[in-house]
Image (cartoon, rainbow, N blue to C red):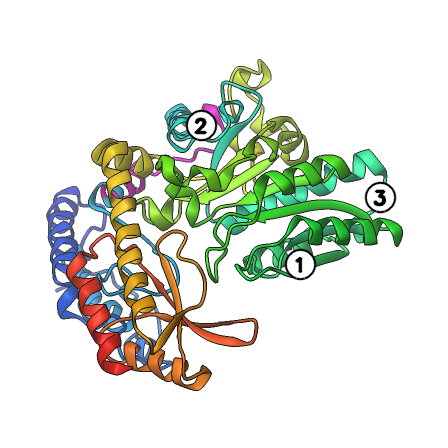
């Protein structure tokens, strides 16, 4: 007697399992403190739990959830853990999770306005809201000459800006990419260097920084003038508002003025710190932003929205679309031909795109701007408290200013003691990132988990005190 395989399209089974999955996620998030921040896993452990061949026969949906407990959770790092202080936040929240689930359920393609109008119009509208909420130039709204688009990561946004800058420079000067020069901080994210290589730029200048790990304008001017004298073509400059290592801030206005003087494309990378601009007290860090051609920040870092959700704004969308647009016959449609709509497939490299804006929209609705500001200010307050602890203890020294919610410090006994402290912390219930700059070791403590409370920061301080 043969038995038919379970139907994977059975909506009743889907409904029941979906309810169980929501319960599982809620229990997982509620129980994070009982788990280690990073599971003890060796290379190959996860694959060893998987069969050698894909299954021939289907199994019931009800059996899928066991895989989470048996295979997945024992092999992950718990980025949502309240004691996660490593890297930068990779935030999530219930409204973002629901938005992601709904987007997956809808399963639509948003490559053109005509393929799903709501995908495009919600995205345009929500990013226009964020223009107002973060104090960036009004011209960056889609109702003006510029506009915003959601990309997978700040790396994608920066790579896109580099390609557009290359084409703008080529049309203006006739120079080949191999003659063009990109300028950014030696502390900038590695995506700048990678993007310049991918886009074919011949030269990238990683500029020296000052005692606060920011680039001084005179350093940038000198590099540009030296390259002009050598017959090269300066093309692109990036200012960081919150570098990865120490959250240093380059002087945006001075960079913008130099970019204008020498006719460079000016990009601003605020991947982490852009979210802080919802709060008025941080906006002085972006003074001069009206001089920028492009700008990026990640809602999936510090805006309670799960990965991937990176915002990319341009001051003028025309060169972006001219660079990225190719229109084969199968993508022609009346709305596009009439110029009445935005087709986001012309705003980045991929053609296909998913409904990323739904989760961001729901986060903004559920938290409200007031709630998001309160969350950011709470995290910054925790960081300031930890900074005061570091500064008051003679065993430690602050390695860089605490500009946002990242605290960088080191042990006064030197590099070996600093690395040992970081290792001990990571072996005792928290997770931080050991790093180096200017040949010195230091510890990065990034505060920004959705579920971190003041008691977790108090416990962190007590742990540092005990282990040092």
Q: Please give left or right for residue 71 compared with residue 202 in the image.
A: left
Q: Secondary structure at mark 3?
A: loop
Residue denoted by label 3: 175
The answer for how far apart the CA atoms under marks 1 and 2 are is: 44 Å
Label 1 vs 2, first from the N-terminus:
2
What residue span does the magenta drawing correspond to? 98-115
Above or below, 467 relative to 239: below
- For the residue pair 94 and 133, the one nearer the viewer reads as 133
Q: Which quadrant of the figure contains the C terminus? A: bottom left
Q: Which quadrant of the figure contains the N terminus? A: bottom left
Q: Which mark is residue 207?
A: 1
Q: Quadrant of residue 376?
A: top left
Residue denoted by label 2: 115
Q: Secondary structure at mark 1?
A: strand
Q: Nearer the viewer, mark 3 or mark 1?
A: 1
Residue 460 image position (x, y, % from top left):
23, 69
Q: Nearer the viewer, mark 1 or mark 2?
A: 1
Q: Quadrant of residue 251?
A: top right
């Amino acid at each position: 007697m043969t038995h038919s395989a379970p139907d994977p399209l059975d909506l009743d089974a889907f409904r029941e399992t979906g309810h169980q999955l929501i319960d599982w996620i809620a229990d997982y998030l509620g129980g994070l403190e009982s788990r280690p921040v990073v599971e003890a896993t060796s290379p190959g452990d996860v694959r060893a739990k998987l069969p050698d061949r894909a299954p021939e026969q289907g199994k019931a949906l009800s059996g899928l959830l066991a895989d989470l407990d048996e295979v997945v959770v024992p092999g992950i790092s718990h980025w949502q853990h309240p004691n996660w202080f490593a890297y930068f936040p990779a935030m999530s929240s219930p409204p973002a999770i629901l938005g992601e689930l709904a987007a997956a359920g809808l399963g639509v393609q948003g490559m053109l306005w005509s393929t799903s109008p709501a995908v495009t119009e919600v995205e345009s509208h929500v990013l226009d809201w964020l223009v107002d909420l973060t104090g960036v130039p009004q011209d960056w709204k889609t109702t003006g000459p510029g506009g915003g688009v959601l990309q997978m990561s700040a790396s994608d946004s920066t790579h896109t800006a580099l390609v557009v800058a290359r084409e703008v420079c080529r049309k203006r000067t006739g120079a080949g990419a191999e003659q063009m020069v990109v300028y950014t901080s030696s502390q900038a994210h590695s995506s700048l260097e990678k993007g310049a290589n991918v886009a074919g730029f011949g030269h990238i200048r990683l500029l020296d920084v000052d005692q606060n790990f920011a680039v001084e304008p005179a350093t940038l001017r000198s590099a540009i003038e030296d390259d002009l004298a050598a017959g090269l073509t300066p093309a692109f400059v990036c200012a960081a508002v919150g570098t990865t290592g120490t959250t240093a801030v380059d002087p945006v206005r001075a960079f913008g003025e130099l970019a204008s003087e020498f006719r460079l494309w000016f990009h601003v990378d605020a991947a982490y710190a852009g979210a802080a601009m919802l709060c008025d007290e941080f906006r002085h860090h972006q003074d001069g932003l009206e001089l920028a051609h492009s700008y990026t920040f990640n809602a999936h870092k510090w805006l309670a929205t799960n990965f991937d959700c990176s915002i990319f704004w341009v001051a003028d969308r025309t060169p972006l679309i001219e660079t990225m647009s190719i229109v084969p016959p199968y993508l022609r449609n009346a709305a596009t031909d009439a110029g009445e709509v935005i087709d986001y497939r012309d705003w980045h490299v991929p053609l296909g795109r998913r409904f990323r804006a739904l989760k961001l929209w729901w986060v903004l609705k559920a938290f409200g701007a007031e709630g998001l500001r309160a969350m950011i200010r709470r995290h910054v307050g925790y960081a300031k408290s930890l900074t005061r602890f570091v500064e008051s203890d003679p065993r430690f020294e602050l390695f860089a200013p605490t500009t946002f919610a990242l605290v960088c410090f080191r042990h006064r006994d030197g590099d070996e003691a600093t690395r040992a402290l970081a290792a001990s912390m990571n072996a005792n219930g928290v997770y931080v990132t050991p790093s180096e700059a200017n040949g010195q070791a230091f510890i990065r403590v990034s505060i920004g988990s959705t579920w971190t409370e003041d008691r977790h920061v108090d416990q962190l301080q007590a742990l540092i005190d005990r282990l040092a």
